[in-house]
Amino acid sequence: MTDPHAVLETRDDIDLADRLRAARERVLDEIHKRIVGQDEVVEQVLLTLFVGGNSLIVGVPGLAKTLLVHTVADVLDLKFSRIQFTPDLMPSDITGTDLVQEDPATGERRMVFMPGPVFANIILADEINRTPPKTQSALLEAMQEHRVTVQGRTYTLEEPFFVFATQNPIELEGTYPLPEAQLDRFMFYILIAYSPEDEELEVVRTTTGLHQPVFSHAVSGPDIVAFQELVRRVPVAEPVLQYAVRLVRTSRPSPDGAPPFIKQWVSYGASVRAAQYLILGAKARALVQGRYHANFADVRALAHPVLRHRILKNFQAESEGITTDRLVDQLLEVVPVPSSGM
């Protein structure tokens, strides 16, 4: 069994962990030059970066979903690409395509690959549910493998690489809901809500003047890649691993062992990918909080953004207005935290 009090072992890793924490503070300071409040949302976006995942950001229009992702790219000085998803968007509009070009000197014609907007470091898939599934799926290989295949040839995407997709929860007429298999590939389902009045007042004050923030680029792309590798070296005690897996398994309406509320309201529970992201997110959260090992509190803190899009409700739950966040709340209540002293 893994030592429940194990920490990063090498001095180099500890130094890198301290750099990660300091970098996170500097990045937060820079982001808040443009983004007011939304601390939990920003935190989940940064955890996505440190893990190397992709996340879905959902909120009504006008809550700075696009601005937040663009600001993160500006702060990190990474290549940013925004793809506006529309019903007529084609897969090649995302990945790129081969074009015939003529050499002016020789007159020879040949096929040349023209990269699409997916060839960037941070991709904003804006309103991803407004394009048909065939085009939505064009992002799957890029998100999972960090590469694209066009006309039988594979092109590797530059690291670091992230996809942040946005959805508008209203005006759903004419949209194409993401299939469960594609939803499962997003690490977090990040909900962005209206800000408190004082923060909304500050937003109006700062965005209606002439001031344009100037960002200092304290963190580079190679730094992000190094932080991602460090996150995977963070030790996790066996009881914490077991707790994450038990949360995920309890969300499934199996004939034996599932809680009554799961059997009553859930058609399908979370996949093993949910447990993987609970642990990876817990590792990153531990590091940004100055700890060198993940614990139960880290797993519990990330249960909602990791699980809310992976639990498929049945018709009864929909008709009774049961939300997935309520189901996750009940999961956290019924799955006991092991008493290991962590």
Image (cartoon, rainbow, N blue to C red):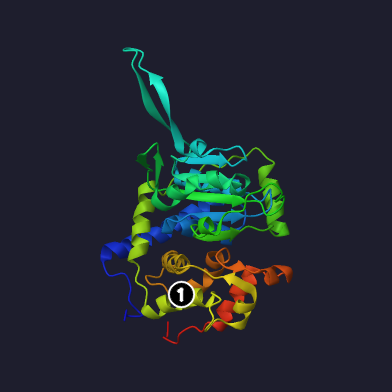
Q: Is residue 216 at all visible to an observer of this figure?
A: no
Q: Position of residue 69 (x, y in %)?
A: 54, 48
Is 192 situated above or below 103? below
Residue 309 quadrant: bottom right
Across the whole image, how many numbered discs are drawn on residues? 1
Is 289 situated above or below 227? below
Disc 1 designates what residue? 244
Q: Position of residue 228 (x, y in %)?
A: 37, 57
Q: In the image, is 218 to the left or to the right of 30?
A: left
Residue 15 quadrant: bottom left
Residue 322 quadrant: bottom right
Q: Position of residue 251 (x, y in %)?
A: 54, 74
Q: In the image, is 209 to the left or to the right of 133?
A: right
Task: Return the residue nearer the eye: 264 or 183.
Answer: 264
Task: Return the residue nearer the eye: 161 or 313.
Answer: 313
Q: Quadrant of the C terminus?
A: bottom left
- Residue at the spot 31% in from the left edge and 12% down from the top edge: 106
- Residue at the spot 41% in from the left edge and 67% down from the top edge: 283
Is 108 situated above or below 154? above
| Element carrying mark 1 | helix
- Amino acid found under the numbered disc labelled 1: Ala
Q: In the image, is 135 to the left or to the right of 202?
A: left
Q: Quadrant of the N terminus?
A: bottom left
Q: Residues within 10 Å of mark 1 (few under 14, many from 20)?
A: many
Is 211 situated above or below 318? above
Q: Is residue 200 at all visible to an observer of this figure?
A: yes
- Residue at the spot 42% in from the left edge and 53% down from the top edge: 144
Q: Position of residue 299 (x, y in %)?
A: 48, 72
- Residue at the spot 35% in from the left edge and 68% down from the top edge: 234
Q: In the image, is 219 to the left or to the right of 37?
A: left
Residue found farthest to the bottom: 339
